[in-house]
Image (cartoon, rainbow, N blue to C red):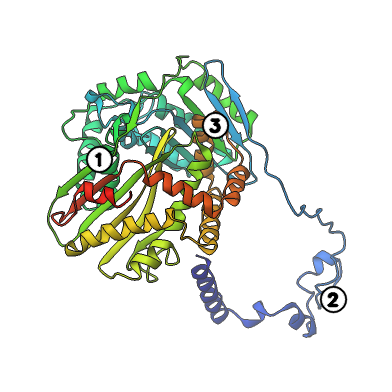
């Protein structure tokens, strides 16, 4: 990523050198040896009138250097304050000049009733629109004036709203963020406009087979709340009134966390408390029930490709160690496409790439995925093959999952997966917005934020037996299978399920 910047700097230097006198860019040693009747460039600093510059290894007179930084500067510890109504405020200070502030709500598609299916999807699109205090135009101008960035995300269990800008704008950031979440106007014309975009987005989902099948394995694999669609179905008529009722029922203080990265805790409290302390203190409801059952989903659309996904239930974040094992297993299996820009494929040293993509050109894509929730989750493999190779491709994927369960993975594969998992965690947390999101979502899940060192330690302690035992336990559960495209050659659910037993 820095190579481009370096090459541009080199080009710029060359342009400047060509267009300006060379003496402007001569080194200090060259200038020192040259004769000049005029005072030296830095003579005003040293008090002298000599035409030569002082050597670079002699300190300038009267200039005191600040003490050097320590070899290791520990980040400030996370601070959490719970308001009287149950809302939590969490901050983690940093030396970065910018800050990220997010409001995270324990409310996702699992809380949707039949009459409001897709409400969270539409709320994601309606984020930072007109409020009872601001028009959309004014809101955009205020965010632009502080140089801020905003984002919103909807998942099956949580909603997130985030704003990012320089620290000097913290009061303005908080005010805009809370106004947008607490006081949305839900104007009819804005709701209708976003509904049209939602329908277009749903139509585009068919062009993203992997995303489509990830939705399908949830609807086929679960009975209950987790089977609710993440996307708004066209059959449900969502209105501003429906959204307003959904927000009033679910956006309560005990189900909210305001998390910030790069903000002083006491400073944030002074701004936030007057704006959120009047939220209703309603007891946090129990999470809607979901049960993993397994199942089969098929949609025949024809074409020259067969897309499929095989998935099994894994523990959720309430079983932290096994959820981490599932993440490492995903990295170990890896995979990717048969071709990607810039190289022959992604994850080319991973299990699926070496043993399937590299050996069978009929397989166009083969990638492991995870979808982990509070109490349950899914681990699976998505694949894309030519239609006449679909049956063989599915059998190959099943056999490779069995091979991992039988302990055929060696220490080299595991070490690579563990290193890749740790790198992904640490590199993601370098982002302020991801750090704020991690704080908010962990507090919603655990009631606290667990130190990253705990996750890294758990990863380091994993061994080959842990991976084999975990995979054996996973594939012993009912299979969830989904296929899309040319599915006539996809084998029956029963025949695929038998391959794992």
The residue nearer to you, when weighing 215 against 137, is 215
The reply to whether the C-beta atoms of the residues labelled 2 and 3 are less than 8 Å apart is no
Inter-mark Cα distance, 2 to 3: 53 Å
Going 55% across and 57% down the picture, which residue do you hit? 419
Q: Is residue 473 above or below residue 110?
A: below
Inter-mark Cα distance, 1 to 2: 87 Å
Mark 2, residues whose alpha carbon is within 10 Å: few (<14), some, or many (≥20)? some
The residue nearer to you, when weighing 393 against 237, is 393
Where residue 183 sits: x, y (%)? 38, 24
Mark 1, residues whose alpha carbon is within 10 Å: few (<14), some, or many (≥20)? some
The residue singled out by tag 1 in the image is 295
Where residue 101 sits: x, y (%)? 51, 36
Q: Is residue 404 above or below residue 117?
A: below
Going 27% across and 49% down the picture, which residue do you hit? 498
Q: Residue 171: which disc?
A: 3
The residue nearer to you, when weighing 111 against 370, is 370
Direction from residue 76 to residue 7 in the image, left or right: left
Mark 1 residue element: strand
| Whether residue 202 can be seen here | yes
Disc 3 versus disc 1: nearer the observer = 1
N-terminal-most mark, 2 or 3: 2
């Amino acid at each position: 990523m820095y190579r481009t910047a370096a090459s541009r700097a080199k080009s710029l230097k060359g342009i400047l050198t060509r267009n300006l006198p060379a003496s402007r860019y001569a080194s200090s040693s060259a200038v020192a040896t040259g004769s000049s009747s005029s005072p030296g460039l830095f003579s005003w600093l040293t008090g002298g009138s000599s035409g030569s510059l002082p050597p670079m290894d002699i300190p300038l007179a009267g200039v005191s250097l600040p003490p050097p930084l320590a070899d290791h500067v520990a980040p400030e510890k996370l601070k959490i304050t719970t308001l009287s109504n149950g809302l939590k405020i969490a901050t983690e200070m940093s030396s970065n000049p910018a800050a990220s502030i997010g409001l995270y709500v324990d409310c996702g598609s699992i809380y949707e009733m039949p009459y409001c299916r897709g409400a969270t999807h539409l709320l994601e699109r309606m984020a930072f629109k007109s409020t009872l205090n601001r028009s959309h135009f004014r809101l955009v101008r205020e965010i632009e004036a502080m140089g801020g960035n905003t984002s919103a995300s909807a998942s099956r269990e949580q909603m997130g709203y985030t704003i990012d800008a320089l620290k000097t704008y913290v009061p303005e950031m908080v005010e805009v963020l809370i106004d947008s979440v607490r006081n949305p106007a839900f104007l009819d014309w804005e709701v209708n406009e976003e509904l049209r975009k939602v329908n277009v987005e749903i139509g585009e989902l068919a062009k993203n087979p992997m995303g489509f099948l990830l939705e399908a394995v949830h609807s086929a694999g679960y009975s209950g709340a987790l089977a609710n669609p993440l996307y708004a179905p066209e059959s449900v008529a969502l209105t501003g009134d429906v959204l307003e009722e959904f927000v009033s029922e679910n956006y309560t203080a005990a189900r909210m966390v305001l998390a910030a990265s790069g903000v002083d805790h006491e400073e944030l409290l002074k701004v936030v408390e007057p704006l959120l302390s009047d939220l209703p203190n309603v007891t946090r409801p129990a999470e809607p029930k979901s049960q993993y059952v397994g199942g089969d989903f098929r949609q025949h659309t024809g074409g020259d490709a067969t897309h499929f996904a095989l998935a099994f239930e894994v523990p959720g974040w309430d079983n932290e160690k096994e959820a981490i094992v599932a993440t490492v297993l995903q990295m170990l299996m890896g995979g990717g496409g048969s071709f990607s820009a810039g190289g022959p494929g992604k994850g080319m040293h991973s299990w699926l790439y070496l043993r399937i993509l590299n050996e069978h050109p009929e397989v166009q894509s083969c990638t492991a995925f995870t979808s982990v929730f509070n109490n349950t989750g899914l681990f699976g493999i998505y694949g894309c093959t030519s239609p006449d190779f679909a049956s063989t491709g599915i059998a190959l994927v099943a056999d490779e999952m069995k091979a991992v369960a039988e302990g055929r993975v060696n220490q080299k594969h595991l070490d690579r997966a563990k290193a890749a998992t740790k790198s992904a965690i640490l590199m993601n947390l370098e982002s302020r917005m991801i750090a704020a999101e991690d704080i908010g979502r962990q507090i919603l899940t655990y009631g606290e934020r667990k130190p990253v060192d705990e996750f890294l330690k758990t990863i380091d302690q994993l061994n080959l037996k842990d991976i084999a035992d975990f995979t054996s336990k996973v594939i012993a559960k009912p299979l969830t299978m989904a296929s899309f495209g040319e599915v006539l050659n996809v084998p029956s659910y029963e025949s695929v399920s038998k391959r794992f037993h």
